[in-house]
Image (spheres, rainbow, N blue to C red):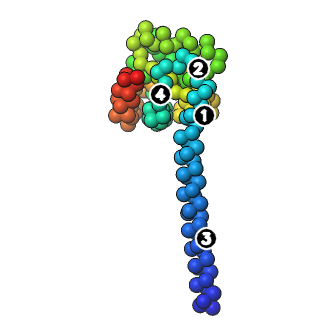
Amino acid sequence: MGKSSKVKESSKSIKHSKEVKDSKKESKKESKEDKSLYEQRLPFVTPFSTPLADKKLNKKLLKLIKKSSKAKDCKRGIKEVIKAVKHNSKGLVVLAGDVYPYDVISHLPVFLEDHNIPYVFIPSKSDLGNACNTKRATSTLFIVPGSNKKGKSDEYKEEYEEVMKLVKTL
């Protein structure tokens, strides 16, 4: 009995090590897929989508959006963004580059420049919606730190300042 129980234990450990190796391979595949998702979405970006965030900035923006949406410092949608800008709110506007028809957001870059609000495009409206913790795709998003009275904007203040510096250099 002693030998058979040892054989069973060793076969279990071999199976476990194979599962770990398989999961590592899958995680590498997923990271390659994440990298290629950015390139896959670029052909669908509108011609006037400048400044367009690169891969690194896109990733930082999505993380910032997740944190700001938890703090409820985000305005989603074209109407809300325009309303907030007209009320002299300060922050960063993130626009989706794959909005169709183009006319829906084509007026926003000029409007934002007139009000001295920094803005940046990202390739996908579905990524923008997912980062906001919504099921629907979102074409525009306005991050207004401190708009919520609860003071949760301190949690993402450093990331916000870093992203703002990168956006202003574009």
Q: Which residue is most to the right?
A: 101
Residue occupying image coordinates x 55% and y 24%: 96
- In the rendered image, residue 95, in percent from the top left (x then y), is placed at 52, 22
Residue occupying image coordinates x 47% and y 16%: 84
Which of disc 4 and disc 2 is earlier in sequence? 2
Dot 1 crowding, Cα within 10 Å, few <14, some 14–19, many 20+: few
Query: Element under label 3?
Result: helix
Q: Which mark, residue 52?
A: none
Which of disc 1 and disc 4 is earlier in sequence? 1
Question: Disc 3 marks which amino acid?
Answer: Lys
Return the residue at label 1: 40
Quadrant placement of the C terminus: top left
Q: CA distance from mark 2 to mark 4?
A: 13 Å
Residue occupying image coordinates x 49% and y 13%: 109
Quadrant placement of the N terminus: bottom right
Classify 78 as above or below 128.
Answer: above
Q: Is residue 36 left or right of residue 110?
A: right
Return the residue at label 3: 15
Classify 27 as above or below 13.
Answer: above
Q: CA distance from mark 2 to mark 3?
A: 49 Å
Question: Disc 4 marks which amino acid?
Answer: Ala
Which of disc 3 and disc 4 is earlier in sequence? 3
Q: Nearer the viewer, mark 2 or mark 3?
A: 2
Query: Element under label 1?
Result: helix
Query: Element under label 2?
Result: loop
Which of disc 3 and disc 2 is earlier in sequence? 3
Question: Disc 1 marks which amino acid?
Answer: Gln
Return the residue at label 4: 53
- Say if mark 4 contacts mark 3, CB within 8 Å: no
